[in-house]
Amino acid sequence: MIETDTHPKLLAVPMLDFSREFAEIREEVLAAIAGVCESQRFILGPEVARFEAAAAEACGVPFAVGCASGTDALWLALTALKIGAGDAVVTTPFSFFATVSSILRVGAWPVLADIDERTFNLSAGAVEKVLGADVVGIMPVHLYGQCADITALTALARERGLKVVEDAAQAFGASWEGVKAGGLGDAAAFSFYPTKNLAAFGDAGMVSTRDEVVAERAKMLRQHGMRRRYYHDEVGWNSRLDTLQAAVLEVKLQRVEAGNRRRRELASLYNERFTAAGLVGKTTAEGVVLPFTDPRAEHVFHQYVIRAPKRDALREYLTAHSIGSEVYYPLVLSLQESLKFLGYKKGDFPVSEKAAEEVLALPIYPELRVEELESVVEAIRRFYA
């Protein structure tokens, strides 16, 4: 396409730019890191306990247990709830691999159920159809930063005596009917991977719960099953939250609420610009389908995800113009090579499989500039023109 005065050159827009946030917090975060280096308390130093207390308060729960990653947090949550061999847990095929691998890691069996077409989250109706006698838990994923329908899922869980484990890896600060993610189930798992809304400078995670017994077990399990040093009550794991990461997270926790507000503002602006450009449709046969926010949810837009006609070609066009995008996720878990033994086949989860063919995440982070957002929308308008 030839650029002209009436068709100006598009701006390059990174999918994410860590340097912008770092420029704002540089002095504070370096001071926090220096404090840990000077104290020499590198493993479970005071910063870990302080961050756990602050994060628990932010999630509206009494207990939070830091750990080494979001994946470990899922494992810790399941194990702390005594879910293991012989048990089955229902979850979604439209998620990151750790959702299913954590269930397998504790020796349980993942049972998959399809998603809601609008939110991409686990469908309670689909869950109800697969509840067998061996099912002891449900693991909803708060995908892209919007809580799953906890009202319906909790009703099912109570009726059947099941545990609810929130995969809240993408949803720090999100809420459902005023209750924060992390306090909606029996336990929850968060990831603080560098791309997340609340992000460490490496891998880190956290389990949250309202249950003191579950919290105590998670703390024990993250230290090789030790309650007393060198006395191992169970076979646990080495999954402690590094003190350096806790120090970074302490600083960033103070900014996450404002960051989430800005993400919602940017999502609204995307919606406005897409609508003004005449790109919006109810289905991909009619145009770009914008993200749906359930009125009961407060979305934190970890990702801003559209459904896009000719998604792969659009992504190639954006990449050619140095505009970032990503597909979360291009292949459902039920069709992953390593999970063939679960016995699923193509067509078993039509809503999830269709989403995998259409979803496209666009740049969204608090430091994204309005002119960059507008360039993203303009690029998409030109592609479909």
Image (cartoon, rainbow, N blue to C red):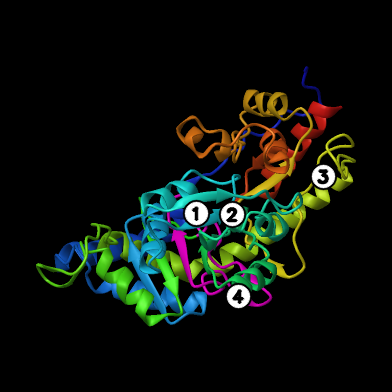
Give the labeled residue for mark 2: 302
Give the labeled residue for mark 1: 196
Residue pictured at 31% horizontal, 72% vertical? 217
Tell which circle, 1 or 4, labels the residue nearer the N-terminal end.
4
Residue 260 visible? The answer is yes
Q: Any mark on residue 274, and which? A: 3
Q: How would you rate the neighbour count of disc 3 (Cα within 10 Å): few for under 14, some for 14-19, many for 20 or more?
A: many
Q: Any mark on residue 158, and which? A: 4
Q: 297 left or right of 138?
A: right
Q: Which residue lies furthest to the front in this view?
A: 133
Q: Write the start and end of the magenta stretch as one range.
A: 169-197
Q: Distance between the residues labelled 4 and 3?
A: 41 Å
Q: 65 left or right of 148?
A: left
Q: Distance between the residues labelled 3 and 1?
A: 25 Å
Tell which circle, 4 or 2, labels the residue nearer the N-terminal end.
4
Q: What amino acid is labelled 1 in the image?
A: Lys
Tell which circle, 4 or 3, labels the residue nearer the N-terminal end.
4
Q: What amino acid is labelled 3 in the image?
A: Phe
- Identify which residue, 96 or 262, lies in the foreground: 96
Which quadrant holds the N terminus?
A: top right
Tell which circle, 2 or 1, labels the residue nearer the N-terminal end.
1
